[in-house]
Image (tube, grey):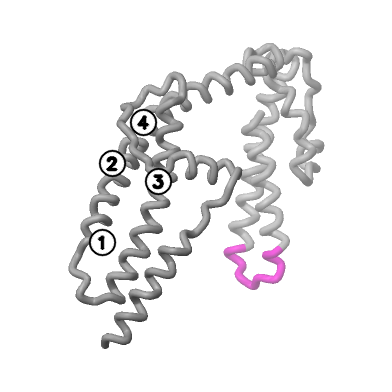
Amino acid sequence: VEQLEGLVVARLFELSKANLSHGISGYKLQQHISNAITKRSLAIRTALDKYNELAPLQRPPRPTLEYSEIASYGWLGEFELLKHSHHDILSKPWASKANREIATKYFKIVRAREEITRLNVEIGRLHAWIDYEDVHLFSTGEADDSDPHLAHEIHHRCKAQRCVNNVHRVTLQAIYNLPGFSGTVRPVDVPDAALVLSELEGHSAIQVDEDDTLCDEANRLEACISE
């Protein structure tokens, strides 16, 4: 039946080409389109005969069709009858909504287990990276401070990045504390963990240490005066 639908659709396209060919002066092209339509019509008749042989075998039986009916089909919506051409389509297991929902949930569980395995690897990588980055930031901050301006900027950026890494550490600790966590648990050392956690939960805001800010500004001013 799908073959019959495909042939009729192809015939519609060829008829549209034939309508366009009236403005074409090429005789051979017009003959080629005309021959294609003739051959397509023969193929449609063959497929229609096969459909009419099988139509009474459907459950419920489907009515037979005439070539004139098929040839007059002008849009795909007229092929709604093809939806009922399969044998006992509603009796198939996948036709049940409950079965489809169960299958969907099953595959979600399978994919979720794969995702857990992948996340266990990513969690370990994140933990290793922030530990490495903090060591690198510490060594960078202790570098030669012969240039006060550069040293101040490095110190400021290192401090900001350590705050970000501490947020990651608090999140990692919360993941490690989850019941059923199957990854590798690593020790987490977070200074002022309660303050970071309260900031994440929105209970309080992290206040800027004004003394540190004033001290940094004083150091920068002293360096500029000494130059």
Q: Do the residues labelled 3 and 1 touch (CB within 8 Å)?
A: no
Q: Report helix, strand or loop for mark 1.
A: helix
Q: Which of marks 4 and 2 is nearer the N terminus?
A: 4
Q: Nearer the viewer, residue 147 or 102?
A: 147
Q: Is residue 102 toward the left or the right of residue 124 in the image? A: right
Q: Mark 2 points at which residue?
A: 128
- Alpha carbon separation for disc pair 3 and 1: 17 Å
Rendered-image quadrant of the N terminus: top right
List the residue tagged with mark 3.
166
Please tell me which residue is depicted at 24% across the width and 54% down the height of the picture.
Answer: 136
Tag 4, which secondary structure? helix
Residue range (magenta) = 20-29
Residue at mark 1 = 141
Count residues near mark 4 (Cα–Cα under 10 Å), then give few for <14, some for 14-19, many for 20+. some
Q: Residue at x 41, y 63 (%)?
A: 212
Residue ID at (66%, 24%)? 50
Q: Considering only order in the chain, which callout, 3 or 4, is on the residue closer to the N terminus?
A: 4
Q: How crowded is mark 2: few (under 14 residues within 10 Å), some or many (20 or more)?
A: few
| Displayed quadrant of residue 114 | top left
Q: Is residue 217 above or below residue 202?
A: below
Choose top left, top right, bottom left or bottom right for residue 214.
bottom left
Q: Where 133 falls versus 78 (above or below)? A: below
Q: What residue type is labelled 1?
A: Gly
